Amino acid sequence: MSASPRHLAIIMDGNGRWAKRRRLPRQAGHLMGASGLKRIVRACADREVEFLTIFAFSTENWRRPADEVSALMSLFIQYLTREVKEMREQGVRLRVIGNREAFDVPLQRLIEDAESATAHNTRLNLTVAANYGGQWDILNAVQSWQAANPDTPLSALAQQDLAEHLSTAGMPDPDLLIRTGGESRISNFLLWQMAYTEFYFTDTLWPDFDDKALDAALTWFGTRVRRFGKTDEQVSGAPLKTYSLGESL
Ligand code: FPP
C-alpha cells in the first residue's frame, strides 16, 4: 500500500561518502546531491505531497572545512538563481527557514527574491532549512512570542502559541521523515514539529535516492498505523467496551 504523506521531511545524508567511494572530492557528492534534490522535488509534486521540508545546512555544519562550507553556499546560491523558473512552472512555493543573519546580504536578498517570486504557487510547498537547528527554532519562538507579548508572563505561553512562532508556523507537522545515509538520528532537525512523525531510515546515500527509493519509503509509510497517543481500537474505530469499577473484566 502506498500513501503520500501530506508533509514529508528529508535529511539528505551521504553525499560525502558517495563521493569518497568514487575517489571524488566531497563537493562532487554535494553537486550530485543537489541534482538529486531537483529530482525528488519533481517526484513529490507528482505524488501530491503538499509540503516537502529538506535539511540543507544545519547550524552545526559551519564546523566543516571552510572550502566545503563555501561549496555548499555556492550550490545554495545556484539553486536559488537557477531553479526559480522551474519552480514557477511546477507550481512550487519556496520558503527558507533558519537563521538568515549569518548569510551575507546578497544571499539574504536572493532568498527573499526566490520566496517572493514563488509566493503564489500552491502545488508543492518546498521549505529549505538552511543554517537551521531545531533548538534554535524553539528558543527563537519563545523569544519572538515574548517580544510580541511583552506584558504577558512567560507562564501564560501555551503550546499552540509556541507553534505559531516557530519558523514552520502555518504548516502541518511532518508525517514522515526520511533520513538517507545509514544514520538513525534526527540531528537537531524539526525537534518540536516531529513529535508524532514516522521515521524512515535507509542506508541509501542521498545521491542514489531516486524515485524508486522514494516509493519504497512511501509504501512503508502506508503500512504505519498512526495513533497520536490513542489506542489501536480507538484509531481503527472498533467499538470499545467500557467497565465500571468493581465489574470483573
Ligand atoms: C549531508 O551529507 C549533506 C549535507 C550536509 C548537505 C546537503 C546538501 C545538498 C544535498 C546539496 C545542496 C542543497 C541545496 C538546497 C542546493 P554529508 O556531507 O554529511 O555526507 P557524509 O555523511 O557521507 O559525509
Image (cartoon, rainbow, N blue to C red):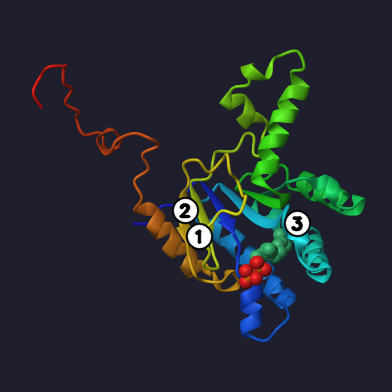
How many residues crowd mark 3 within 10 Å: few (<14), some (14–19), many (20+)? some
Q: Which mark is residue 199?
A: 2
Q: Nearer the viewer, residue 163 or 107?
A: 163
Residue at which label 3 appears: 84
- Is residue 61 rendered to the left or right of residue 10? right
Image quadrant of residue 29?
bottom right
Q: Whole-percent x and y of residue 222?
A: 37, 53
Q: Residue at x 69, y 32 (%)?
A: 141
Three-letter code for the amino acid on which mark 1 is drawn: Ser
- Is residue 128 rendered to the left or right of residue 46? right
| Residue that sits furthest to the right in the current view | 105
Three-letter code for the amino acid on which mark 2 is drawn: Phe
Three-letter code for the amino acid on which mark 3 is drawn: Val
Q: Which mark is residue 25?
A: none
Task: State how far apart marks 2 and 1 are (Cα).
Answer: 9 Å
- Determine whether the residue tagged by mark 2 lies in a helix, strand or loop: strand
- Determine whether the residue tagged by mark 3 lies in a helix, strand or loop: helix
Q: Residue at x 61, y 62 (%)?
A: 12
